[in-house]
Amino acid sequence: MVKHQVFALVLGLAVFNGIFSPLVQLVAAYSFMWAPPWLPADPSITFYLSSLILSTTTLLVAGIPVAVLEHLLPASREAPGPNWIWALVSLVLCFPAFVRLLLISGAVH
């Protein structure tokens, strides 16, 4: 896979984590802290913005090991390895979302 395809995988994992993560309810519960007062209190808007916050957080947190690696080894910037590390860390961050999806679907009791 080329670097752009791995990056698309990372983005897909981040979106998946933003939608199905158990932390969505926690972020939504604290919406009074991050949501502006002029925003309508519609639950769908709160869910969407909470999901967006979690997706962005997944991208940022999963990118930290890659940034450290590229800082320590500047020659690795052109290699596909750092993108695979980013995808692997994103996948690890998605485990609670996978468990929640299995519980919702009824595959696991």
Image (cartoon, rainbow, N blue to C red):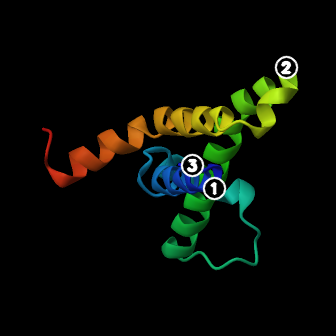
Q: Badge 2: how crowded within 10 Å, few (<14), some, or many (20+)? A: few
Q: To which residue does mark 3 refer?
A: 6
Q: Regarding mark 3 in the picture, which secondary structure is present there?
A: helix
Q: Position of residue 68 (x, y in %)?
A: 79, 25
Query: Residue 10 or 78: which is nearer the viewer?
Result: 78
Sequence-first tag of 3 and 2 = 3
Which residue sits at x=61%, y=61%?
A: 52
Check the image and report above or below for 42 versus 28: below
Provide the secondary structure element on which disc 1 rests. helix
Tag 2 secondary structure? helix
Q: Which residue is mark 1?
A: 4
Q: Could you tell whether 12 is left or right of 36 in the image? A: left
The x, y position of residue 15, in whole percent, is 52, 57
The kind of residue tagged 3 is Val
Q: Amino acid at mark 1?
A: His
Query: Identity of the amino acid at label 2?
Result: Leu
Image location (x, y in percent) of residue 82:
67, 34
Q: Quadrant of residue 53?
A: bottom right
- Taking the spot 80% from the left edge, 36% from the top edge, the residue there is 77
Which mark is drawn over residue 26? none
Residue marked by disc 2: 72
Q: Nearer the viewer, residue 40 or 52?
A: 52
